[in-house]
Amino acid sequence: MTGWQTLFYKEVLRFWKVGFQTVGAPVLTAVLYMLIFGHVLQGQALVYGKVTYTAFLVPGLVMMSVLQNSFANSSSSLIQSKIMGSLVFVLLTPLSHWDWFWAYVGSSVVRGLLVGAGVFVVTVYFGQPGFVAPLWIVVFAVLGSAMLGALGVIAGLWAEKFDQMATFQNFIIMPMTFLSGVFYSIHSLPPFWQKVSHLNPFFYMIDGFRYGFFGVSDVSPWLSLGLVLTAFFIISAVAVNMLRTGYKIRH
């Protein structure tokens, strides 16, 4: 195996060895969301004119799990390695910053997609959303997990303590995820909050992903794809530059 493949394998093995925590727990959380929100709101609302609420909720929960766990994978690996001092063993290897980037982002994509597949399998019983455009589902799932994996690299390099990482998760990742339309269509919001939602890149990832199931979305999937690609390249450029300069890891 090449250098980045070895680091990628190590990162995949790291989260797979604690699969109950890294894959099983997020799936259980999504089931609880489905049981609570689906039970309360099923039959009370239709979305996009004819879609039941539980069917609408399934893709949102899947994508939310993909995004949160992709971020958690790269960020937790880096911060734990920094605090425990084991990162020095990776620093001693002749890996380039591109090797680091693809290994951490690639393993984040794998974990995000595994969790997303698990959430879909256990929640589809409650509402079957259909597969109108499967290619859009795959594109947004991979792009979203890669983007959050790159964002996790930035957070993992920046944070020096676990409480700094918790701040990043609680005040950036969590609010942007929950205010992105996971549980509702933004057309049900007042005009002001609709405009606020359009500033949230997470909204476009979830809306584009949901388009693949229903063929209907709040905005054009092509607009979502363009904005998500732009955000991915910007975040990746920042992460690669931080790895290239050894930000907070080579001093």
Image (spheres, rainbow, N blue to C red):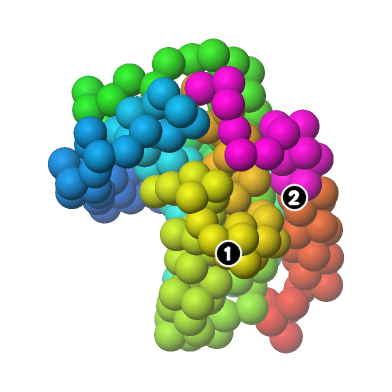
Residue 187: give x, y in percent of width and height: 55, 47
Occupied quadrant, residue 163: bottom left
Residue for badge 2 = 232
**Above or below, comparing residue 27 to residue 83 in the picture:** above
Q: Is residue 142 left or right of residue 164?
A: right
| Quadrant of the snapshot with the N terminus | top right
Does the magenta segment cover residue 43? no
| Residue drawn at the location 36% of the way across and 38% of the way down | 57
| Residue drawn at the location 73% of the way across and 45% of the way down | 228
Please say whether residue 219 is visible from this viewpoint.
yes
Distance from disc 2 to disc 1, alpha carbons, whole Å, reads 24 Å
Q: Earlier in the sequence, mark 2 or mark 1?
A: 1
Q: Main secondary structure of the magenta part?
A: helix
Residue for badge 1 = 193
Does the magenta segment cover residue 226? yes
Name the residue type under label 2. Phe
Q: Which residues are magenta?
A: 214-229
Name the residue type under label 1. Trp
Q: Is residue 245 left or right of residue 172?
A: right
| 101 and 25: which is toward the camera | 25
